[in-house]
Image (cartoon, rainbow, N blue to C red):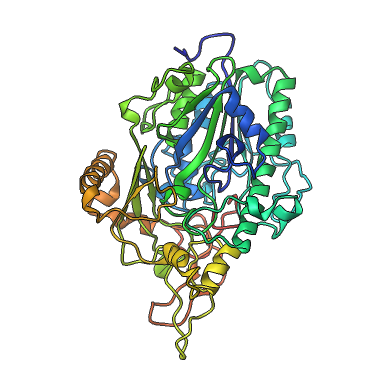
C-alpha cells in the first residue's frame, strides 16, 4: 500500500489542466485523429481513468471545486460562473506553500472571476508565471510559452524545496482558427464527430480545429516532462493531466450531459504508484485536492472540510487488482450547474444537478421553464426568426452552432438543433454505457422506473447531506451573486431582441449590481 510522506523526499506535483476538452479526445483512449504523446506517456507510466468527471461543466466553478475539494454548491459565490471566491474556502496551493512547497501557475488559473474582491492576495491557483511568450501555430491559440514559464519557475525554486505547479492552458478554448485541422494535415473523414452533432463537413472541420488545440496543450506538457526528466525530478513528481470541462460544442460544455462533464484524466507518480492501471469506476475532480495533500503528507485545516476523497489507494493498487482502492463508496459522482454565460433576462442561470454511476446519468433540471441555452429570438413581423446569434448565448459561437441555427429547418439538422436548445424535462435519465451521446431520455420508461427512483433519491440525499441551497428555502441564492464578466441587456421576453449592455466600471470597495464589470485580475477575456 502506498504510504504518503515516506521515502527519499516529499513529492513534487505538476497539475496540467486543459480548457474545454471532453473525454475521450486523447490518444490513450483510442482516438487516432489526435496526437497526444505526453498524455499517453503519463497514462502508460501511471493510471488511466476512463470515468473522470468535473464537478461543473464551466470553467470557474469547476476550477474552484478542484482547488478546494468541495462541490460547487458548497462554495457560495465560487459555485457559479465569473463571480468571486470567498477567502474562507481554503485552496490546496496555499496549504502546500505554508508547508514549504514552491508554488506557482502559468496560463489560466482560477477564472473567470474576481478573486481580489474576496480579499485574496493572488489568484487561488498560486503566484503567476506568465512572462515568457511563444509564437502560436494558429490564431486563437494563446501566445504564452507555458513550458518556458515552467522552466523559469523551477530555476527560482529554493534549494531542497518540493514544488507544486499548475499548468493551465487556454486551449482548446474557442475561438479556433478555421481550417487549422486540415492545414495541419488532418483528414475530415478521421474526425470523431460526437453522436449529438450532425455529421457534416462543417462539423468535421470544427472538430479537427479543436483537436489541433489539444495537441498544442499536449506539446507543452511534453516539454515539461522532458524538463523534469533532465533535472532528475520526474520519478518523484506526481503528474496529473485533465481538463476543467467538456468541449465547446452544442450539448457539451455548459451541460451536465456526458460530453460536458466527462473529461480525460491520467495520473502518474513513478517513484510510488504502480504503472499500467486502467480504472473504469467513476471518480471526480473534487478528489484531486485530497489526493495531492495526502501525497505531500500535508494536513488540510478542516474548516470547512473537503468533500472529495483521496485517490492514492487507487494509484497504489497493482495491475490486476480489479477494484482495489475503488470500493463501493465510489459508485457514483455528482455535478452541478448554475449560471454560465450571460444568456437570460436578469442574468438568471439554468440550475441543474446530476448523479453519474458507471452505467447511468440522471439529471435534475430545477427551472424547466427556462431555455437551457438561452431563449430563442423573437420572430419578425413576417414570422421569420431574428438574427441567429441573438440567442443561445450559453453555447460558444462556432461554425457548428451557426450550422445548427441556420439550417434548423433542414430535416437532417433539425433533431440536433432541438437537442441542443429546446426546453428539457425535470428529470433526464440516460444509459450512458450504451448511449454516450445522451440521445434517448429513459426517464419515462417503465422498464427504468426503479433506476430513476433510486438515482433520484440518491442524488437528493447527497445534496441534502452536503448542504446544497437548492434543497432549501433559498435555492435561488445563486442568482444573486455578483457577476464580474459581460452581462447582456435582455429586455423582457415579449420585447425586442437583446443587446450588449454598455461597458461600465464598478468600484471594488462596494458591492456591484451585476453590471458589465471586469476585475483587472480576471484571467480570461471570455465568459469561460
Q: Residue 95: where, in percent of width, then height?
A: 49, 27
Single out the residue that lies furthest toward the right: 135
Foreground: 186 or 254? Answer: 186
Residue at horizontal 74%, vertical 53%?
138
Foreground: 467 or 227? Answer: 227
Q: Residue 258: where, in percent of width, then height?
A: 43, 48
Residue at horizontal 29%, vertical 45%?
468
Residue at horizontal 51%, vertical 57%?
484
Foreground: 20 or 282? Answer: 282
Q: Residue 404: where, in percent of width, then height?
A: 52, 68
Please indicate whether residue 526 sits to the left or right of residue 308 in the image.
right
Q: Image quarter for residue 214?
A: top right
* Residue 479 drawn above or below residue 128: below
- Location of the N terminus (image quadrant): top left
Q: Residue 111: where, in percent of width, then height?
A: 54, 48
Single out the residue that lies furthest toward the top: 7
Q: Image quarter for residue 482?
A: bottom left
- Location of the C terminus (image quadrant): bottom right
Amino acid at each position: 500500500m502506498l504510504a504518503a510522506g515516506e521515502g527519499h523526499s516529499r513529492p513534487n506535483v505538476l497539475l496540467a489542466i486543459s480548457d474545454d476538452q471532453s473525454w475521450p479526445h486523447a490518444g490513450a483512449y483510442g482516438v487516432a485523429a489526435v496526437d497526444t504523446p505526453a498524455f499517453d506517456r503519463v497514462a502508460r507510466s501511471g493510471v488511466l481513468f476512463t470515468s473522470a468527471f468535473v464537478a461543473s461543466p464551466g470553467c470557474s466553478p469547476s476550477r474552484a471545486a478542484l482547488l478546494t475539494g468541495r462541490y460547487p454548491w458548497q462554495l457560495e459565490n465560487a459555485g457559479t460562473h465569473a463571480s468571486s471566491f470567498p477567502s474562507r474556502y481554503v485552496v490546496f496551493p496555499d496549504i502546500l506553500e505554508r508547508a514549504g512547497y514552491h508554488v506557482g501557475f502559468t496560463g489560466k488559473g482560477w477564472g473567470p472571476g474576481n478573486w481580489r474582491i474576496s480579499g485574496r492576495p493572488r489568484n487561488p491557483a498560486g503566484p503567476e508565471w506568465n512572462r515568457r511568450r511563444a509564437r502560436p501555430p494558429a490564431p486563437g491559440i494563446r501566445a504564452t510559452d507555458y513550458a518556458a514559464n515552467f522552466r523559469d519557475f523551477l530555476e527560482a525554486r529554493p534549494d531542497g524545496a518540493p514544488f507544486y505547479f499548475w499548468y493551465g492552458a487556454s486551449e482548446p478554448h474557442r475561438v479556433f482558427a478555421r481550417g487549422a485541422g486540415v492545414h495541419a494535415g488532418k483528414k475530415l473523414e478521421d474526425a470523431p464527430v460526437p453522436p449529438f452533432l450532425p455529421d457534416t463537413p462543417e462539423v468535421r472541420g470544427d472538430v479537427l480545429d479543436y483537436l489541433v488545440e489539444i495537441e498544442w496543450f499536449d506539446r507543452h506538457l511534453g516539454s515539461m516532462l522532458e524538463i523534469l526528466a533532465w533535472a532528475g525530478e520526474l520519478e518523484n513528481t506526481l503528474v496529473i493531466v485533465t481538463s476543467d470541462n467538456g468541449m465547446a460544442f452544442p450539448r457539451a460544455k455548459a451541460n451536465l450531459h456526458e460530453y460536458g462533464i466527462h473529461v480525460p484524466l491520467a495520473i502518474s507518480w513513478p517513484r510510488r504508484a504502480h504503472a499500467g492501471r486502467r480504472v473504469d469506476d467513476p471518480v471526480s475532480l473534487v478528489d484531486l485536492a485530497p489526493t495531492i495533500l495526502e501525497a505531500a503528507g500535508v494536513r488540510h485545516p478542516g474548516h470547512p472540510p473537503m468533500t472529495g476523497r483521496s485517490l492514492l489507494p487507487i494509484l497504489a493498487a497493482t495491475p490486476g487488482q480489479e477494484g482495489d482502492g475503488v470500493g463501493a463508496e465510489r459508485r457514483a459522482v455528482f455535478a452541478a450547474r448554475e449560471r454560465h454565460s450571460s444568456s437570460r433576462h436578469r442574468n438568471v442561470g439554468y440550475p441543474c444537478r446530476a448523479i453519474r454511476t458507471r452505467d447511468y446519468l440522471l439529471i435534475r433540471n430545477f427551472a424547466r421553464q427556462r431555455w437551457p441555452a438561452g431563449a430563442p429570438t423573437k420572430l419578425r413581423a413576417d414570422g421569420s426568426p431574428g438574427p441567429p446569434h441573438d440567442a443561445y448565448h450559453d453555447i460558444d459561437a462556432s461554425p457548428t452552432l451557426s450550422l445548427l441555427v441556420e439550417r434548423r429547418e433542414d430535416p437532417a439538422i433539425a433533431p440536433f438543433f432541438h437537442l441542443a436548445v429546446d426546453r428539457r424535462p425535470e428529470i433526464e435519465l440516460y444509459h450512458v454505457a450504451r448511449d454516450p451521446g445522451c440521445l434517448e431520455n429513459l426517464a419515462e420508461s417503465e422498464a427504468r422506473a426503479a433506476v430513476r427512483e433510486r438515482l433520484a433519491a440518491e442524488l437528493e440525499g447527497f445534496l441534502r447531506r452536503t448542504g446544497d441551497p437548492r434543497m432549501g428555502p433559498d435555492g435561488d441564492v445563486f442568482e444573486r451573486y455578483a457577476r464580474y464578466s459581460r452581462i447582456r441587456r435582455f429586455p423582457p421576453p415579449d420585447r425586442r431582441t437583446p443587446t450588449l449592455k454598455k461597458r461600465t466600471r464598478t468600484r471594488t470597495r462596494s458591492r456591484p449590481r451585476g453590471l458589465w464589470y471586469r476585475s483587472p485580475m480576471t484571467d480570461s477575456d471570455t465568459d469561460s
